[in-house]
Amino acid sequence: MVDKKDAERQDEETPEETPEETPEETPEETPEETPEETQGEEGKESNSLTGVLNAKIAALAIVGLVVGILVGQVVLPGIGIGLVALPAEGNIGQGAIDEAALEAKVLAYLEENFKLQEIVVEITTFEEFNDELYLVEFKLSKDDQNQIGGVYVTKDGTTMIAGQIIDLEAPIPEVQLQEQPPQNPPVQLSVGDNAILGNEDAPVTIYEFSEVECPFCGASEGVDTPVSQQLKQQNPEWEPIYPNLKEQYIDTGKVKLVYKHFPLSFHPQALPTALAAECAHEQGKFWEYHDIVYKNRDNLNTENFKLWAIDLGLNQQQFNTCLDSGKYAQAIQLDIQEAQSIGVSGVPAYYINGQLISGAVSFSELKKVIDQEIAKVE
């Protein structure tokens, strides 16, 4: 990775760029894990379970009613097979609900679950699947990204089924065992002039690619309460990464954290905030500034960037000149290029001794890998 001081000298040769848009919370051209808009096959072979599955469901991504769509990451993660109890309001007696009323009820449920991420839900198919179920296909949209999902709903309006329905009378397919593909070797990254938190001789190094406006990055940092609450509703054991990582591993000398910028082009304040953070880094206050901007994600603007620098006791003239000139634009672009070169497709992304963990996962997921890496050197 190019030294930031060298990067400063290249500013005039290389224009400022925002990252190519790949999903997860992602830029929109995707090196990997791109949420593809999957089209179901048209037509209906038969009214049997397997016939309808083959004709209508085979190509569907079964989408969970969870946080994490089009954002980290921002893709649509699935929940596999599961049952969702629908609200009791609107049920008609003990039998089936009027089809139109049930479709409206399902749409309202989907809209409620996705409203925090500002995702538009459109039901594209609502049809009888068998004597007890309706098949529901829907499209989820945010900005110019779309994904198709499918669920089943009981005709009495009490339960939604997310996952594949299996015909128990069908022959059991022969299972073909496949060899496990070899694991990818650890990715090699360079520290360069990036900000480091923790003991430089720590046995474990974590590189974090992130940006301040991504709601899942905020959740991982432990400051984005609405998204954190929704993640915790989906998984009661979910915990934010940064505060736990700092307390349990960084402050104890076992881990050092290296911060790399990956501002997404559709977040207008992500790049300016990264530039401001690097100007604070120039005066030795990156992590203090980092904490301030993440806690004030709803108030990101140039005036506040400069006020926060004053609050931290930074040299005001030096900071303002640095920020106004875009001094570290090329250095940030180098972080972006490095991320894209190793296949990072969204934020947050963590490399633990070269092993990738993507998205706003629970801290426990990182903890497993960290403990394994520490055990190797003990």
Image (spheres, rainbow, N blue to C red):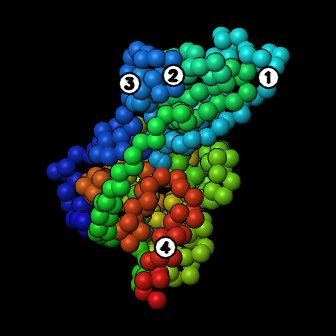
Pointer 3 residue? 39
Pointer 4 residue? 370
Of circles 2 and 4, the one toward us is 2
Give percent across and percent down for residue 322.
Answer: 37, 57
Q: Look at the numbered discs 3 and 1 and tell me whether their residues touch, using CB distance below 8 Å.
A: no
Q: Residues within 10 Å of mark 3 (few under 14, many from 20)?
A: some
Pointer 2 residue? 48
Could you tell me the amino acid type at mark 1?
Answer: Glu
Could you tell me the amino acid type at mark 4?
Answer: Ile
Residues at marks 2 and 4, CA–CA distance in whole angstroms:
49 Å
Of circles 4 and 3, the one toward us is 3
Residue plotted at (47% across, 65% down):
286
Any part of residue 237 in sight: yes
Q: Look at the numbered discs 2 and 3 and tell me whether their residues touch, using CB distance below 8 Å.
A: no
Could you tell me the amino acid type at mark 2?
Answer: Ser
Residues at marks 2 and 1, CA–CA distance in whole angstroms:
31 Å
Could you tell me the amino acid type at mark 3?
Answer: Gln
Tell me which numbered mark, 2 or 1, is placed earlier along the sequence: 2
Q: Secondary structure at mark 1?
A: loop
Residue plotted at (16% across, 51% down):
13
Q: Report the front residue among 12 and 75.
A: 75
